[in-house]
Amino acid sequence: MHGIIRKEIGSKIFNLLASSSEFLSGPMIARKLKISRATVAKRIKRFRTLGCKIDSCPGQGYRLVSVPDKLLPPFITMGLKTTIIGRQVFFYPKIDSTNSQAKAIAGHGIHDGALVITDYQTQGQGRLKRQWVSPPKKNLLFSVVVYPFVAPSKVFLMTVVASLAVCKSLNSLFNIKAGIKWPNDVYVNNRKICGVLTDVSLDQKRVKRVVVGIGLNVNVEPSLDQELGSLATSIKRETGRTQKRLPILKRILEEMDRLYKRFLSGEITHLRDEWLSYSIIFGKKVNIFSDGLQENGIAETIDEDGALILLTPGGERKKIVAGDVSLRIQETGVRRKESG
Ligand code: BT5
């Protein structure tokens, strides 16, 4: 209990500093929050040990100059331009999986758009019991909990919201041209940079909650990682330099916020069209794997429920539902093994 109160005071002091570009005096902060000046000074000291740069000037007070690249809740919400996504943040230094944790806490006072984020997953999950691999503190690993009032057939649009948000952010921040490989992967130059894992829970045929997990490679060096090898890429690999994770996360949350609101207001066709414009599979020969069976054909389009329309060699059009399938693009010399 005491810990919670201390945390709340810390957040309040931090929020005051973060909302002002001017110096704020210690006595003024103390008066406003009904705490002692000593408490203010102690908290400021703690923020500095966390890596915040805070100027102090006798007679004027304190001014927040910068925050470290740490994925802590006050740093994430500071200046975050969203109204739904990421307004509530749960950070864990290490956890089994943010999707599992988000599912466990969803419904227990967890708001629409809550963010569950970690620096390291011990059991990062992909689809179909595959693994998501990510060394500690290198990448972005997070899940967002939402409660959209939509029919189950439209849940795929949350995967659309997530993958589009990632593509747009990579483009606007780094001029990286990312594309979407149906159903849930983001690729750059034929290598996977991000995976999305969407989990839905239903209540009498309506959607009760959706957890959308995003794993984005930021500073991992795939070539140094045997498991990722030549299949994966990262923002560092594409840009040639180490990148800060916090601004990337914020941009993705802001893009998700915009896209999620469009989804809620029924702009489904627009969202789908935008998603299609990022697709890297249309017109290409693909192999579909499901339950040990394989289908080949040309990826033609994606229908209004997110299913892939496959044109088979016999000229038949088959509808492939995303659920339990993997897709491989048939291109020689580009990919050496299936990566999801
Ligand atoms: C995915 O599955 O791509 C969904 C990954 C979602 C991960 C996030 S992290 C936060 C949240 N919490 C979780 O526990 N999960 C979500 P799939 O399409 O099945 O792809 C998995 C395959 O991608 C693996 O079998 C590997 O081949 C490959 N892979 C694993 N880690 C990778 C990485 N860091 N970068 C690129 N490819 C990777």
Image (cartoon, rainbow, N blue to C red):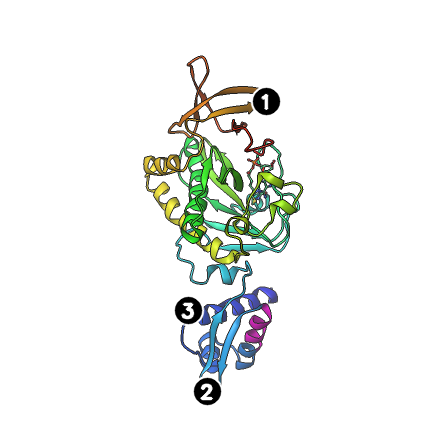
Residue 155, can we see it?
A: no
- Under circle 2, the secondary element is loop
Amino acid at circle 2:
Gly
- Determine which residue is flagged by label 1: 291
Tell me, for residue 59, which label it has, or none: 2
In the image shown, does 22 or 335 lie closer to the viewer? 335
Which mark sits nearer the N-terminus, 2 or 1?
A: 2
Give the extent of the magenta segment: 42-50
Q: Quadrant of residue 306?
A: top left
Query: Foreground: 283 or 64?
Result: 283
* Residue 49 part of the magenta-drawn span: yes
Instruction: Give the overall secondary structure of the magenta segment.
Output: helix
| Residue 340 on the magenta segment | no
Q: Please give the name of the residue rendered at 52% of the width and 72% of the height, measured from the top-left corner.
A: 53
Residue extending farthest bottom: 59
Residue toward you, 91 or 192:
192
